[in-house]
Amino acid sequence: MSMAIKHALKTLRSEDFSAWYQEVITGADLAENADVRGCMVIKPYGYAIWERMQRILDDKFKELGHTNAYFPMFIPIDLFEREAEHVAGFAKEMAIVTHHRLEQCDGKLVPAGKLETPLAVRPTSEMIIGQSMAKWAKSYRDLPILLNQWCNVVRWEMRTRMFLRTAEFLWQEGHTAHETEVEARREAVQMHEVYKWFICDVLKIFGIPGKKPEYDKFAGAVETYTVEAMMQDGKALQAATSHYLGQNFAKAVGIEFQGRDGKLQYAHTTSWGLSTRIIGGLIMSHSDDDGLNLPLAVAPYHIVIIPMLKGESSQEIMEYCQKIKAMFPASIRCFIDTKEYSAQNKKWDYVRKGVPFILEIGSKEIETESVCVTQRIPLEKQSIPLSEFIGSIEKMLADHDAILQKRNSDFCNSKIVHVSSYNELKEFFSSGNTGFVKAKWSGTATNLQKLDELSVSIRCIPTEQSGTIGKCVLTGDETITDAIFAKSY
């Protein structure tokens, strides 16, 4: 009789993916639901991951010439009304401030002081930042304007899930204004490439870069670029987007400058963003039935040392732990946990938090000049001579990242299928399958209701195209364009 494998989590991915996802978040102590409906509290460990993401991206943005600024979170409704497509795209998600004070009435606080012009709580900042750009850009010499903002936004979601979809979330939003269309398009593509690098190379998440179909662009954009990541349940997650906005927003808010020919013209603008949703993507891409798994770049700790303190030997054990920590290169983030909990409980806490290597150090390790190490991937425990461990730790950490990336890539590639007709597309999704389906698409919005019936959408037109000719699975028309179809978050 085979023994059932014990895991650090009670819920397995194969049993209930949604409940497993929530348990990973709870087990790793990343976040919890707030008292305000639809909002969450990002706890210190979860926020440490976001801080590492911020640092990496912020450095990259600045390397490319962008500077950080901050703009108001309250945006007058009449400002949104200047760009009809934009306001229509966000109208159902906006939180609106209508009053400016509270008053006592029958022992209760009630809103009073009605605002003459209602204010939207920032769902995105194209209009409010564009208004400032209109003041700053008077000549072609003032361009380009390359801005980024780290902030919170509010989109009033009815059905929420931590990190993936909450009423308030954190993000960065880049906004740029350019002299020419060529420069602006180049900027949008460049930032799309930055996101592809961050998601695929830094976070080790499998993603397909491409363009959004015309009908599914960002509200008010000319073109939207996306990275579509596949989660372990086969669903797609829009990981980050970059938009070429043309002159639409410049005309709406008056970003007008004197060109090289002395004539007034409108700037070409872009916007691009990535949010804390990517933490949800990280969880669903790499975690397993023992909890969270993290790539080195964003892991708060690479190594945690747990001293197994006992009586008179406690000081000697602590000194040995400090000695081990001092032997690691400065690039390795190491933490010695001296909290008064059992070593076994602490170990499993760190397994659930996805720490790559956990060392348990007691008198035995001192006597044998060794370390007792639990490696997170694969989850196994062994005793290694200290000198051997120190000499191999950098390679072991690199292997950790390589395993994460290969495991995720192999899984996702195994879930990509090709179909050549709507009947094949329908059979695949109607049978309960999930994954990315690559098929031909004519580029028109014709027969999209067929996808709605399957709860499927066109996620992107991949940057890499096969170049073959085939028939559109929705219209039957001959086309050269490949598209990715999937269920999504």
Image (spheres, rainbow, N blue to C red):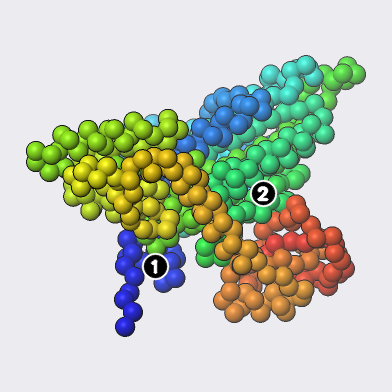
**Callout 1: 10 Å neighbours few (<14), some, many (20+)?**
some
* Mark identifier at residue 226: 2
Give the residue type at disc 1: Leu
* Mark identifier at residue 101: none
Considering the numbered disc 2 on the image, is that residue within a helix, a strand or a loop? strand
Residue 233: x %, y % from top left: 52, 65
Residue 37 visible in the snapshot: no
Looking at the figure, which quarter contains the N terminus? bottom left
Task: Please state which of residues 335 and 40 is positioned toward the viewer in this rendering.
Answer: 335
Considering the numbered disc 1 on the image, is that residue within a helix, a strand or a loop? loop
In the visual, does 46 lie left or right of 247? Answer: left
* Residue at point 38%, 44% (across, down): 389
Residue 316 visible in the snapshot: yes
* Mark identifier at residue 12: 1
Q: Residue furthest bottom?
A: 1
Residue 63, by quadrant, is: top right
Give the residue type at disc 2: Thr
In the visual, does 348 lie left or right of 158? Answer: left
Instruction: Assess whether mark 2 and mark 1 are in contact (beta carbons under 8 angstroms).
Output: no
Q: Is residue 408 above or below residue 427?
A: above
In the visual, does 292 lie left or right of 193? Answer: left
**Callout 2: 10 Å neighbours few (<14), some, many (20+)?**
many
Residue 271: x %, y % from top left: 66, 37
Residue 314: x %, y % from top left: 14, 38
* Residue at point 45%, 33% (across, down): 331
Q: CA distance from mark 1 to mark 2?
A: 31 Å
Q: Is residue 230 above or below residue 117?
A: below
